[in-house]
Image (cartoon, grey):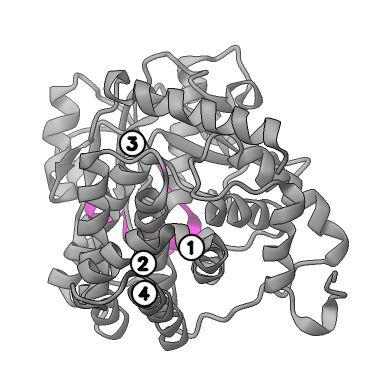
Amino acid sequence: MNQAKKIYCRTFQTVMKIALPFLPYKKPEIVGSVRALPELITKRKCDNVLIITDAGIRSLGLTKRLERALTENNIPYSIYDKTVANPTTANVAEALDLYQSNGCNAIIGFGGGSSMDCAKAVGARVAKPRQSLAKMKGILKVHKKLPLLIAIPTTAGTGSETTLAAVITDAETRHKYAINDFPLIPRYAVLDPKVTLSLPPFITATTGMDALTHAVEAYIGRSTTYGTRKDALKAVELIFENIDTVYNEGHNVNARRDMLHASFYAGCAFTKSYVGYVHAVAHSLGGEYNVPHGLANAILLPFVLEAYGPCIHKKLYQLSVAAGVSSKDTPYDVAAQEFITAIKDMKNRFGIGDTVKEIKEEDIPKLSHYADKEANPLYPVPVLMNAEELERFYYLLMEKENQNTPE
């Protein structure tokens, strides 16, 4: 990256860090069970709910407890269950039409990050009916109060229940972009382990590593606060303590609860301190090829950490100690490598590979441009990279027989 762009990025990031204490961040109120929602909905003077989920969640019957609770308390509801893995502008338009035609005044995002992102985007369109989502992309372009927004995560990974971001894919161009504004933070986050019990092992693993990526990228960035560092360390500790248990013993309620809280803490950390190039590259892969976001993050994380080099060794040492991987008397560089190796070992245990077979070499310049545009100047990464420098990660992820790696 040239010097002028570096100065611009670091100046932008410094201003954002200085502004952090004055920005209206709020943590969602934690609710322990879906059974508690009718009272909260009534208390907020709402009487008609739109539940936004996906077909897989609904077919597993995971929404039944919520539906039963609403019915027993005479709260009408509608369900939009067509959300796709990377929610599109078409999903948002369809859900918005259902919200308006049925006279809803509250929204529940029920599922993984996709359902919650779709719910946030619908709320933004309700708040600003005359503005397209494309005109809200970037930061602080919603600035209107949303309807009551409740998030019920069924995966312990995305952290979307805590964040001010909604990531949406344009249905026509396949370009994936983020909308970031404080009104998008849900009012309530329902951390109910019972809705996560039927999650398959592989998705449990990739979403858990998604949460790990949130915590790590927030911690190693240059815009941390005491609170975000504390949240990130707690998330890493809980993930390393519980992820193998939930992978091997999916019905362990206590481990599932701990993973939900880990995801929540990681979400709180990166909502303020942001993420980095792992996410930027992963978003481009999701937008272009529909690669699940947690999987893309899990594949990429150790590669990007290695690329940052010695400047993050001390922070990786601190994470490694929190994770129980390294002892306090381990040298920084050794502990950093132990932490990265632990992540690689985790991937191997969960059957997560090192490649993304969908990547086409001719797409790499476009994908790296998307990643560059998303990350710079917003993400306070340890080492700045431009689009050309980011191309290395796509080549690393390509299957060897499909590439001509540049010298």
Mark 4 crowdedness (10 Å alpha carbons): few <14, some 14-19, many ≥20: many
> Are the two marked residues, 1 and 4, in contact with CB atoms closer than 8 angstroms?
no
* Residue 13 point in image, percent of width and height: 48, 31
Query: Marks 1/4: CA distance?
Result: 19 Å
Q: Between disc 4 and disc 3, whose residue precedes?
A: 3
The residue shown at (68%, 72%) is 397
Q: Between disc 2 and disc 1, whose residue precedes?
A: 2
Query: Marks 4/3: CA distance?
Result: 46 Å
- Horizontal side, residue 331 vs residue 361: left or right: left
Residue 98 in view, yes or no: no
* Residue 135 point in image, percent of width and height: 64, 21
Question: Which amino acid, mark 4?
Answer: Phe
Camera-side mark, 1 or 4? 4
Q: Quadrant of residue 392?
A: bottom right
Q: Quadrant of the N terminus?
A: top right
> Are the two marked residues, 2 and 4, in contact with CB atoms closer than 8 angstroms?
no
Residue 397, placed above or below residue 126: below
Q: Between disc 1 and disc 4, whose residue precedes?
A: 1
Q: Between disc 3 and disc 1, whose residue precedes?
A: 3
Query: Marks 3/1: CA distance?
Result: 30 Å
Q: Which mark is residue 221?
A: none
Q: Which residue is mark 2?
A: 208
Query: Marks 2/4: CA distance?
Result: 16 Å
> Are the two marked residues, 2 and 1, in contact with CB atoms closer than 8 angstroms?
yes
Query: Marks 2/1: CA distance?
Result: 8 Å
Residue 390 drawn in magenta: no
Which segment did they paint magenta?
50-67
Q: Which residue is mark 4?
A: 339
Question: Which amino acid, mark 1?
Answer: Gly
Q: Between disc 2 and disc 4, whose residue precedes?
A: 2
